[in-house]
Image (cartoon, grey):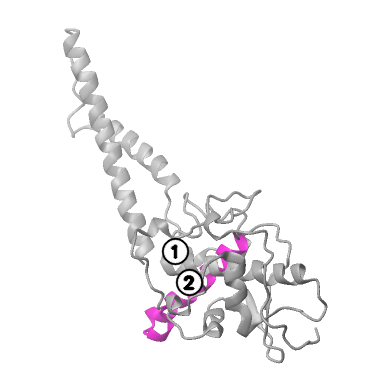
Amino acid sequence: LAAKRELKAKQAALKKAIQERKAAEEAKKKAKAEAAGEDVEMPPAAEGEGAEEPEKEDEEEEEEAFEEFKPVDMDEVDIFGLEDISDVGGGMPLFASFGFEDWATMTLRFEVNVLAHSFRKDVKDPDRVGIPLEHLAFYYGKYFKKTLNTKFYGVDSIGEVLDMIKDTVYVCKKTKVVGSRLPEELESWNILAMLTEEVRRERFRRVEMGDESAKLKLSAPAGPLSATPQPGPASPSAGMRVPPAVRPATTLRPSTMPPRPVAVSA
């Protein structure tokens, strides 16, 4: 609903801008003609057949301008059928309705996915099939040089943090090892925005129905929202650019290890 209201406001602003531009052009022509000592022809009065033509022309121009900003019902967009998430129609990106919590959870999806795959590659130990849940915060700090703060996400445990992105990662019930649902090699990072939008829609639907438990309780940043890590522009070929702020500060190889966990089978 908020997105639709915003689109209507943009349309009204666009219509006003078109009218103001035309008025400015007419005034400029009039001033130029007066300076040259020419007779200025005023547009026909709003009566008779002659007055209908300019009005029709104005409507056609406005329709052409509006076509570019045609409202899109985001609920009707096939999320996983998109080729370009930066334009789902009318110039609107898939992430047009993202709030702070959506950008934060999308970043978390990227980080934990990369961490899960990189750990297995770096340790080169068949007995270590993944990161134990109890050690995830340790390795997160080693790889990304920052703390995985549960309070920031409004929860009390790492497991609850991962529940927010269970479409991307999982915790094995038997071994309590963290794994990724996404393949190690992705054709595009767009999937992260798609998963985030799918969850955002469901959360919004539940909140609209009165389910207060669906609301996320992330701690909003003290500074401007622009300081939050956000993905750069995307294209069908290149996909979503990985946010520089969340790229690992090292070569994704921890310098130290916590106590070696008990060997587990795959």
In the picture of the structure, the residue carrying the numbered disc 2 is 200
Residue 158 belongs to magenta span: no
Residue 196 belongs to magenta span: yes
Q: Residue at x 39, y 45 (%)?
A: 66
Residue 221 or 186: which is nearer the viewer? Answer: 221
- Regarding residue 39, the answer to whether it shows in the image is no
Residue 109 in percent (x, y) is at 58, 69
Q: Residue at x 28, y 40 (%)?
A: 17
**Residue furthest bottom as drawn:** 174
Q: Amino acid at mark 2?
A: Arg
In the drawing, does residue 58 fall left or right of residue 42?
right
Residue 58 or 113: which is nearer the viewer? Answer: 113
Dot 2 falls on a residue whose secondary structure is helix
In the drawing, does residue 150 fall left or right of residue 225?
right
The image quarter in which residue 68 lies: top left
- Regarding residue 249, the answer to whether it shows in the image is yes
Sequence-wise, the earlier of marks 2 and 1 is 1
Query: For the C terminus, which image quadrant?
Result: bottom right
Q: Residue at x 17, y 10 (%)?
A: 35
Query: For the N terminus, which image quadrant?
Result: bottom left
Residue 44 in percent (x, y) is at 20, 27
Q: Amino acid at mark 1?
A: Phe
The span picked out in magenta is: 190-216
